Image (cartoon, rainbow, N blue to C red):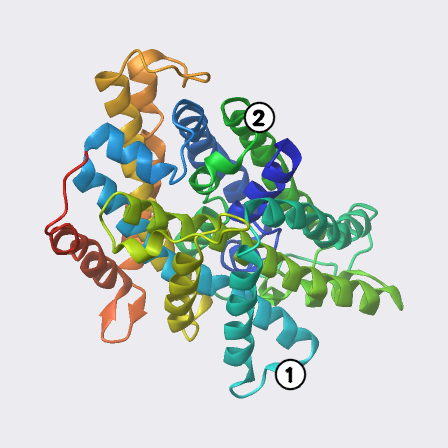
Amino acid sequence: MTVVPLIAAIYFLVSGGPFGLEDIVSRSGYRGAILILLITPVIWAVPTALMVSELSSALPNQGGYYVWVTRGMGRFWGFQEAWLSLAGSVFDIALYPTLFVSYLGHFAPAVTAGGRGAAIGIGLIAGAAAWNLMGAKSVGESSVVTGIVMLSPFAVVTVYGVLGHAAFGGRAIPLHNVDVLGGILVSLWNYMGWDYASTVADEVDRPQRTFPLATGCAVALVALSYVLPIGAVAMTGLDANRWSTGGWADVARAIIPGGAAGAIAAVITIGGMLGAWGTLNAQMMQYSRLPAVMADDGLLPPVFSRRYSKTGAPWVAILACAAAWMLCLGLSFVKLIVLDVLLTGLSLLLEFAALVALRIREPNLPRPYRVPGGLAGAIGVGVLPLVLLVLTAVRNKVEPVGPINALELGAILVAAGVPAYFVLRRGRPTTG
């Protein structure tokens, strides 16, 4: 992949467009949503992008963040990094078929009624697995086209909002369901994934230069694609309580006058489905590389390292991951997010720790890009993300998942990584 396809791939790994932001508006209001979406990149996305730029330029290996943590902190912690990422992926991947079905349901409810929604989700995962067998280059190039088509209707919505086509006037209507922490959680998820593309670093052209450039451009693109359309809709005076998961099409119908509203709503619905598909496709690309690299390191059975001879794609890992990801399609959007943010966020903290460990253990490691500020800068860049993850843990404590809450389920999954390491490494040589 070159710079532009990598920017597009990172965009879909992190964002997939403004879809999924609806819950931030309904829980925090327009001002709260815009404030959250502007602050989150500063205290979450930018520090993460800085860390990823240094480590991906210094160690551009397939396996990305798993390789960083293994080299900086040892084989045990490298396994925990991969374990947390793959455990989080079970909930992360399920989000995108959920969004796809939600948008399709707004457009054609009968199509997703009954058990048909779950069948569509399973079909999407199977389709993404088939596409990924064609290799990372194919995923990156398709992301460019998908991104352009997906974002075009939001440009129209933004223009209508800015031109002042008011949907409602009068005083502001109070929110019915205020949940600022819930809004922050959704924002964290919408700004999470800057490290994901690192797992296919060996399939990127000149990764030492391409990764920092593509990551910086993607941060700006993601933030703008979030804030501009929401800010434009806020100018119309539309009641924030009318926002719901998958509801961008309804927003378009409310603010765009005349016959154009139905056409734009239909295009937004298609864009939402494309965004969910593009993100699912890109996420499958990065997650499926982890089992393959772990198998190469002797931490999973050798069968996971088998690659498709024509494209180099790890076909056994792709198919095994796809089968596991189909299991969580029944959970709600918010439950999937809180579990994903908790597990993936903890894996991210290990990456910040690896940044510091490598600065201490390998000070002479060539780093085409460095987080500024020396060792203190490397330590300080992870402080604000840590604070946000503490807030995540607080919010997870009140989110029920069956007989327990999300924090308890997350803790069980995290703890399971320790015995899993000793079971899976039994009888295999230690390499790090």
Residue named by callout 2: 213
Q: Secondary structure at mark 1?
A: helix
From this viewpoint, is residue 106 visible? yes
Looking at the picture, tell me which residue is in the foreground, 30 or 359.
359
Looking at the picture, tell me which residue is in the foreground, 42 or 296.
296
From this viewpoint, is residue 386 visible? no
Residue at 36 percent across and 49 percent down: it is: 292
Tell me the distance, in whole angstroms, between the alpha carbons under discs 1 and 2. Answer: 42 Å
Q: Is residue 335 left or right of residue 277?
A: left
Q: Is residue 156 left or right of residue 273?
A: right
Q: Quadrant of the N terminus?
A: top right
The quadrant in which residue 413 appears is bottom left
Q: Secondary structure at mark 2?
A: helix
Q: Nearer the viewer, mark 1 or mark 2?
A: 2
Q: In the image, what residue type sits under mark 2? A: Leu
Tell me where residue 367 appears, x and y as whole percent: 40, 16
Tell me where residue 232 appears, x and y as whole percent: 72, 48
Q: Is residue 170 left or right of residue 221?
A: right
The quadrant in which residue 268 appears is bottom right
Residue named by callout 1: 111
Residue contact at pointers 1 and 2, CB within 8 angstroms: no
Residue at 64 percent across and 48 percent down: it is: 143
